[in-house]
Image: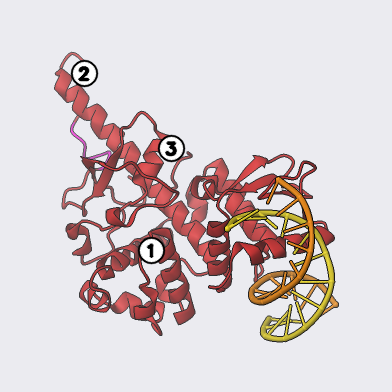
Chain colours: A red, B yellow, C orange
Amino acid sequence: MGSPGCEPTGCTPHSPLYISHQHTHPREGWVDETEDIKPPRSLLGLPELSWPGVYLPYYDRLVMEENPSVPGVTVTPVPLAPSHRTQDSRPPVLSPAQESPSVVEGQAEERCLEQVQTMVVGEVMKDVDTACKLLNIAADPLDWSCVHVQKWLLWTEHLYRLPQVSAVFQELSGRDLCSMTEADFRQRSLQFGDVVYAHLDIWRSAAAMKERCPPEERKSSADDDSWSDVMCSYPSQPIHLWQFLQELLLKPHNYSRCIRWLNKEKGIFKIEDSAHVARLWGIRKNRPAMNYDKLSRSIRQYYKKGIIRKPDVSRRLVYQFVNPL
DNA sequence: GAGCAGGATGACA
DNA sequence: TGTCATCCTGCTC
């Protein structure tokens, strides 16, 4: 994974992330389980945007994929402490001769935590970016229309395996949503209102952070670069299905469990989870009834147009872009 | 049963 | 007019 955008000590405050507990259940699937998505109460009580003290539900995935040496743990972020650390505020570094082993270990752990935090913050930003682009909505919830709000809710439901919560937030604009308190959210959905509130808070925080750190100032990984390239290539809307598929393929970190390259050079890809890809496409196009049968029919329309074809050796759920990226 | 191929039709921008 | 959603039949794996 590449460097996550802006330096934590530069454009955003820096708070510790607590590694709170071991997971008792190994994660399965490409998204996080509902039971893990409730943020800490301290976060929910934050009066202001809490970035980077946000709950990061996919931390395990991140750690396990990017840093296999770190055991399966869950990060529980905490709100900014009044005296949050920065590079400058760290205690003076002792020479090795002066340091006891426990101090060395402590500093190493601290550095490790900071690295992890930086990594996680960057991933959150990237995932919010990705979701924005896939849903075709603004990054800042304040700019959302009622339709955008519904899209985002559907997406959040889908991603975090929430039950249907979008129905109780109908006819609300992003501004309406942002003006609501956590209590308002919980009033609409007793069980998951706080969860939705926390996710909205993450988005608001990401938007605030973007404002402070414009994309050009945020160093991107190679993966991000290619992503940006793709998005720049297709600025117009509506998006075509083949473009959408390419977008998913260009974010293997997020979507490799539902669609992945078999041979990127040849443009051959496999849909690993047909229902999932169809659902994503349906959300993107606001077509709740979308399924793989319809999606695949649309893919087959591309045969005649010379955009997608079946590979020479035809396999189920495997297609090939005629003109690879 | 799931996936695939392709015809037909209609909505929509 | 192009693209896509939808529905359909028939076939293959």
Mark 2 near mark 1, Cβ–Cβ under 8 Å? no
Q: Position of residue A285 (x, y in %)?
A: 58, 71
Residue at mark 1 shares a chain with residue at mark 3: yes
Q: Which residues are magenta?
A: A86-91
- Amino acid beneath label 1: Trp
Q: Mark 2 or mark 3, which has the lower sequence index?
A: 3
**Amino acid beneath label 2:** Ser
Residue A133 falls left or right of residue A34: right
The answer to whether residue A187 shows anywhere in this view is yes
Q: Amino acid at mark 3?
A: Glu
Expressed as whole percent of the image width and height from the top left, the position of residue A161 reads 38, 60
Mark 1, residue position: A203
Judge whether A107 appears above or below A251 on screen: above
Q: Nearer the viewer, mark 1 or mark 3?
A: 3
Among the two numbered marks 2 and 1 on one chain, the one whose residue lies closer to the N terminus: 2
Which residue is tagged 2? A95
Where in the figure is residue A227, as x and y percent of width and height?
Answer: 59, 51
Secondary structure of the residue carrying tag 3 is helix
* Magenta-span inclusion, residue A88: yes
To which quarter of the image does residue A21 belong? top left
- State the mark number for residue A65: 3
